[in-house]
Amino acid sequence: MKLNNYNFDLNPRKPSAEQVNKHKDFDALLSRYEEESPKVVRHPRSRMLYVIGAAAAAAVLGFFFINAFFNQNNYGAEAEEYFASQPYVNPPKLNIAPSYQKHTFNTNKASSFKLENGSQLNIPQDAFVDAQGQPVRGSVDVKYREFHDYVDFFLSGIPMEYDSAGVRYLLESAGMIEIYAEKDGQRVNIAPGKEIKVELVSEVLVSASEADKAPDYNIYVLDQINRNWVYKGKDAIEVLSEERPTNVGPEDVMKQKYQKSLDQIARKNQEELAKIEATIPVVPKPTKPEKANEEHPVFELNFEDVQLESNPTASGTQKMVDEVEDDLAELRKQYANSMWQVNPAKNPDFNRAAAAGIDWESMRLKPLNGNDFELTLIYGDNQMKLIVDPVLSGTDYDNAIEKFNDDMKVYLEKIAEREAALASLKDELSKEIQREKDIANLEYEQQIAAYRADGKDYAANKVMIRRKILNRFTASSFGIWNCDRPLPPFMVKVKGEFVDIDRKSSYAENTAYLVDKSLNTVCRYYTGKGVEVAYNKKSDNLLWLLTSDNKIAIMRPDEFKRISQGDGSHATFVMDLVDKEIKSEEDIRKILEF
Amino acid sequence: MDSSKKTVSKEAMQEEWRIIQAAKKNPAAFRPLYDRYYDNIFSFVFRRTADENLTAELVSNVFLKALQRLYSYEFKGVPFSAWLFRIASNEVSQHFRDAQKNRVVSVEDSHFGEMIEEMDEKDHPNYRQAMIHALDELAEEEVQLIEMRFFEQRPFKEIADIFAITESNAKIRTYRLLEKLRKIILKNSEQGQAR
């Protein structure tokens, strides 16, 4: 609706998740930022001042921070050195990992490879070349496996850290695959310009509060030479099904209670307002007289012959009769000089000749909305129903208009008087209602704040929805492809030491794995003494490492909660050895279950 | 109030501040904030343009400006999103001023009903029509306040953060505006009767 200053869009459509995600591209924004942001060119003199200023500041602050700085760097450097010395994809030495599925097909035709879980690969014709770039003909084996959860990630040894322009993130996965192909036992490559279409069926957990948001993941491919993930674009996700828990979370209960309070307040407001309105009766609004239209037929009614159909409010027969008589008398007085006009627009079937040709015995009049009446003309068993309006002509109309204007003035004055008399009562009520709303709102906000202050606003403690999803993307090369999103760094960082249950020996020179229950990822840490370990203290965390004799030493969530929670403090991770030989993935899953 | 419109916890704000500090040194570190707020800013702008491509362009400008001005951002105890919404609001206004066109105000039926209820008026199609005409007479900032509170269902706290005013000031302004709307509607109705 276009008006003078704004265009009002009533019940607007909302942009779909696809529409939004289509434009969401941080890397493009970053490029634009690089291109469009003014480059700072410092004048040599100001640069000198800047350097001197910075040097002075460094000298003052250096005394306080230099020790901590070096220590921090040493911990970081030690961990960097440790991981740099390890293979980038470094599965634990258990010889247990998600197995490959093999699909053999002839390259002269396009082929589809469907897995039991619904995942599918669509491979185009002539899709492969050998190491020399020559087309591969004939039978080829495609080998494919999927990784879905923290146990898969652990067993695969695939790193989940992502370095974007020097900033390190942890990737949370919505499913990951590894794919390659062989011809007679020799690895082949995907031919330039060819792509394998991947439809990866996976599961993600979504917080109920974010249920309306579309899943938002990117696609990355692992660059094992440069030891980093490479961003390849957006993940086109389709939600196949979801399981919503029937129970509602504590915040929902609080909100329902709050809404109930507001409903009660609104009801009270309505009731009290009605009582206030009833203290002074409403003055009836004068009806504006209507001028007779010469084109339209009219009736002149003898009120002695008219029966009035009204809805008496009184109970008891005599009272009702009296009320109808009073109404009729009022009608007679009000419409003494009126004619009753038939408006053809409201009576499309009106037959003027038929109506005029009958000497009607009696009439019934029933007030309708506004100025309309239903007139029933009766002759024996015959009836004619018409919608009529009382109209006036000539001086009757002029006099009536004059009277109407006078009545209207009185009416408006009385209305204003009434409103003024009720205003203070309404104002008082309005203030009281607002007070009650504010109190309800305050109580609600305090409840929520107290609940969250207790650390319960994190995803792990919210109602989670399990979604089965289909990730669609195209793989232009073989290797490890990941549907992920980068996570902000965890808030709490402690300097850790990993020791056995007796606290007698430490697990140094090892890799520890940390999982936050609310996130589908695994974070790796070097176990050197004093290494920085970051985690989400509001969630359930599971920490483990693999001992030199291939057993799991673990710290479970309840124990983890007992460690020192202060940022920057020292924490001792007491690892409980699970003295059990690990033979299968099932064994690992039992141990790492939480 | 929509459960998705929650005020941000102190800890979350501190976490955001850490990311901002990192992003001041390295713009690439801004990514988590971009990911976190892109959808909200997109919806915010889309409601004021009803045009997908224009929205995408304006949202891109919003984040670019945010990145360019990040050096001047200081943590004042309010969520970072308030700053983004302020930039977005200015970006939308600037665009329509430059284009010499009227901007869009998106109104859902249900929210309109709640607003009329808040005014203690009887909900009726004619009253809604009168309300739209009355809204059209309001200044840009006044319309923004009404749409944030009633059409986008934002808590007063968030509105206060966006407008950089106190929460009670946001409440007072809102109720004064409702009163103003009521008077405009009455005035228009009397003028209509007189005609």
Image (tube, grey):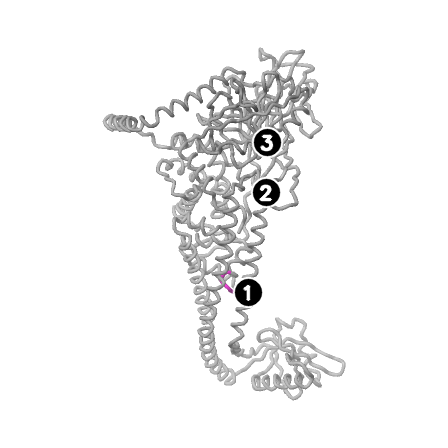
Secondary structure found at label 1: helix
Which numbered disc flags the more N-terminal residue, 3 or 1? Answer: 3
Where is residue A482 shown, x and y percent of the image? Answer: 57, 27
Where is residue B49 shown, x and y percent of the image? Answer: 47, 47
Q: Which mark is residue A174?
A: 3
Instruction: Give, as a single range, the part of the protein colored magenta.
Output: B118-123
Q: Could one spot residue B152 in this view of the protein?
A: no
Residue sitting at 44 percent across and 25 percent down?
Answer: A166
**Front residue of this view, candidates A510 and A19:** A510
Q: Quadrant of residue A70?
A: top left
Q: Quadrant of the C terminus of chain A?
A: top right
Q: Could one spot residue A225 in this view of the protein?
A: yes
Label 3 and label 2: CA atoms lie apart by 17 Å
Please give the chain letter of the residue carrying mark 2: A
Within the magenta stretch, is there residue B121?
Answer: yes
| Residue kind at label 3, given as amino acid type | Ala
- On the picture, is A497 further left or further right than A106? left
Query: Do callouts 3 and 1 mark residues in contact (Cβ within 8 Å)?
Result: no
Within the magenta stretch, is there residue B67?
Answer: no
Label 3 and label 1: CA atoms lie apart by 50 Å
Q: Quadrant of residue A522?
A: top right
Which numbered disc flags the more N-terminal residue, 3 or 2? Answer: 3
Q: Which residue is mark 2?
A: A208
Mark 2 Cα shell of 10 Å, populated few (<14), some (14-19), many (≥20): some
- On the picture, is A580 further left or further right than B46? right
Please give the chain letter of the residue carrying mark 1: A
Question: In this rendering, is residue B194 above or below A304?
Answer: above
Q: Which residue is mark 1?
A: A268
Classified by dominant secondary structure, the portion drawn in magenta counts as loop
Secondary structure found at label 3: strand
Instruction: Residue lying at the far bottom in this picture: please name it.
Output: A304
